[in-house]
């Protein structure tokens, strides 16, 4: 059979215009070592696994991600191409494995985009509006925030406009404008985060209790709340405190992994990054270190200030529909009380509010490069790999990504199907296990590509094995802990459809090219051109 190339052209058409700080910011944006990220870790675990120690859970996440981070850095330095792990798995194991695993990961990115859009509309917007109302004693804004989630359309439109479409717009304006926006928003958000962590670290529980009570009783005509009142309301409703235990904390390991998901997403744009070996050091390894420092310290400071008892009381009341403020009691509604200044509090809340638009810019960019890589290899229609001649970016790949993402946003907001059947943590752990296997066999099967590996072949194999072990544990807890995600026959069926559809697509394209005397499998063992 002819070895005619299946690559659509001799060069990708992409330009290496991103720098080390662009790679770093993409990873930080998607991971979120920020005011929002700290709040979300508490907000996601508290209702699902109330006996968990959030700090210990985060430490488990860091430990599990370290070998994964080293593995991704080595691969991205050696093969800096758009699509990242899709390329590495396909060239190390088999092109079909690379595609069905990469396809599943891409769909999980879109599900993540839909979930983020929903969280922005259902939590971030109402929490931000309510707290800004209390900061400036505006009862109308308080009531608007408290009632925002009464309309599903409000949640949908907020998520689509503020997250999905904003991320799409910025990603589609070209890499220079994209970089400037990411830097500007990133500085604003990260400065605010450092201030928030500092405030929490130096605020005792007694001081917080006093400040909280003053903050939420100083606006006439608005709902009021006091620290002791929250505890008393939980007790009177028989919502008992669940002590922190090791067993509950172990069950929250997938949440710890989830907290750091995204620290390696800069690898998907490595085909557009200058000096990949240096830039990926920042985009993967240093990104993970920054995430670990901010998140662990932030969670520790937050829980010392709040106490687990108060946090459980607030979330239990909210779940029962009896929390007096009528919004999700994420830590973002508590921080303004300790800011001590209306202008500073406003600055911090705006940083919390604009996180998801920033996050969407990183996620849309990363996901679109998957589509580009699939299409450049011609596993998907090659037209999706077209490059805009003026902007030097794959606009069609971006639009395909957002179109499918929008469908998932609709399903997420207007139905319960996604929430009841999709377990993204399971997808990630499966794919990362395959990447670990690829790391072990790459120096053996692809000696032609493994020359000059950072740290040598043995290091890649060791971190590959450690990643397999860590992600196997994550997979176990993800499929056996309902709080993490659905583990039902319907969920298993959807998982099979996600991975199986990738196999079907690859097989269809393989036989399409075979009829034209092209061995797609043989061609896709080659590294794509730059």
Image (cartoon, helix red, strand yellow):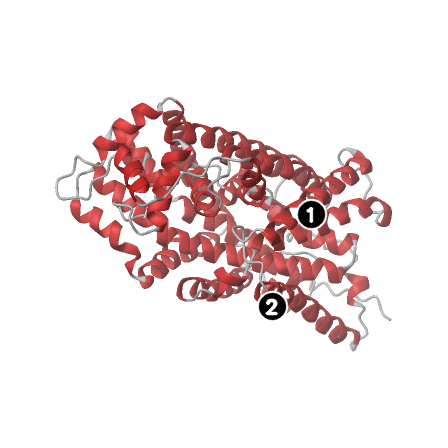
Question: Which residue appears at 76% of the width and 42% of the height?
Answer: 465
Disc assigned to residue 339: none
Residue matched to label 2: 383
Q: Nearer the viewer, residue 515 or 55?
A: 55
Q: Residue furthest bottom?
A: 515
Whether residue 279 sits left or right of residue 39 in the image: it is right
Figure check: 384 above or below 28: below
Q: Position of residue 293 (x, y in %)?
A: 53, 29
Q: Earlier in the sequence, mark 1 or mark 2?
A: 2
Q: To which quarter of the image does residue 9 belong?
A: bottom right
Position of the N terminus by quadrant: bottom right
Figure check: 392 above or below 16: below
Mark 2 neighbour class, 10 Å CA radius: few under 14, some 14 to 19, many 20 or more: some
Residue matched to label 1: 472
| Contact between labelled residues 2 and 1, with CB atoms less than 8 Å apart | no
Figure check: 193 above or below 161: above
Whether residue 42 sits left or right of residue 128 in the image: it is right
Mark 1 neighbour class, 10 Å CA radius: few under 14, some 14 to 19, many 20 or more: some
Whether residue 171 sits left or right of residue 125 in the image: it is right
Helix, strand or loop at disc 1?
helix
Q: Nearer the viewer, mark 1 or mark 2?
A: 1
Helix, strand or loop at disc 2?
helix
Q: Nearer the viewer, residue 241 or 368?
A: 241
């Amino acid at each position: 059979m002819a070895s005619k190339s299946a690559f659509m052209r001799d060069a990708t058409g992409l330009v290496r215009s991103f720098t080390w700080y662009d790679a770093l910011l993409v990873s930080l944006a998607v991971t979120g070592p920020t005011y929002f990220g700290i709040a979300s870790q508490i907000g996601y675990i508290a209702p699902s696994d109330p006996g968990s120690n959030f700090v210990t859970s985060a430490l488990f996440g860091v430990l599990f991600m370290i070998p994964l981070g080293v593995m991704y850095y080595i691969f991205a330095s050696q093969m800096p191409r758009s699509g990242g792990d899709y390329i590495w798995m396909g060239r190390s194991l088999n092109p079909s494995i690379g595609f069905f695993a990469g396809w599943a990961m891409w769909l999980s990115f879109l599900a993540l985009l839909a979930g983020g859009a929903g969280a922005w509309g259902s939590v971030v917007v109402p929490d931000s509006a309510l707290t800004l109302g209390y900061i400036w004693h505006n009862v109308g804004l308080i009531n608007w925030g408290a009632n925002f989630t009464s309309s599903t359309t409000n949640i949908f439109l907020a998520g689509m406009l503020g997250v999905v479409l904003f991320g799409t717009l910025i990603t589609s304006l070209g890499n220079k404008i994209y970089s400037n926006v990411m830097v500007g928003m990133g500085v604003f958000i990260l400065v605010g985060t450092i201030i928030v962590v500092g405030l929490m670290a130096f605020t005792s529980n007694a001081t917080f209790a006093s400040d909280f009570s003053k903050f939420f009783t100083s606006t006439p005509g608005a709902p009021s709340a006091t620290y002791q009142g929250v505890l008393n309301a939980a007790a009177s409703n028989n919502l008992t405190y669940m002590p922190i235990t090791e067993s509950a904390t172990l069950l929250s390991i997938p949440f710890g992994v989830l907290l750091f998901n995204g620290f390696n997403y800069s690898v998907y744009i490595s085909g557009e990054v200058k000096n990949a070996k240096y830039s990926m050091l920042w985009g993967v390894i240093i990104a993970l270190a920054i995430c670990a420092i901010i998140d662990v310290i932030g969670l520790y400071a937050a829980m010392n200030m709040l106490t687990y008892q108060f946090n459980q009381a607030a979330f239990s009341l909210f779940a029962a529909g009896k929390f007096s403020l009528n919004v999700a009691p994420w830590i973002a509604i508590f921080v303004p009380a300790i800011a001590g200044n209306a202008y500073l509090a406003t600055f911090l809340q705006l940083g919390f509010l604009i996180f998801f638009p920033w996050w969407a810019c990183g996620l849309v960019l990363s996901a679109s490069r998957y589509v580009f890589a699939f299409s450049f290899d011609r596993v998907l229609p090659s037209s999706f790999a077209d490059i805009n001649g003026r902007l030097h970016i794959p606009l069609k790949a971006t639009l395909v990504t957002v179109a499918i993402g929008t469908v998932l946003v609709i399903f997420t907001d207007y139905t319960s199907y996604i929430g009841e059947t999709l377990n993204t943590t399971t997808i990630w752990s499966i794919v990362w296990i395959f990447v670990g296997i690829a790391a072990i066999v790459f120096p053996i099967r692809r000696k032609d590509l493994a020359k000059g590996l950072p740290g040598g072949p043995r290091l890649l194999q060791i971190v590959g094995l450690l990643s397999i072990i860590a992600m196997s544990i994550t997979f176990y807890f993800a499929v056996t802990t309902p709080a993490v995600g659905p583990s039902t026959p319907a969920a298993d069926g959807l998982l099979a459809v996600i991975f199986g559809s990738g196999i079907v697509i690859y097989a269809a394209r393989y036989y399409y090219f075979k009829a034209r005397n092209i061995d797609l499998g043989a061609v896709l063992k080659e590294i794509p051109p730059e």
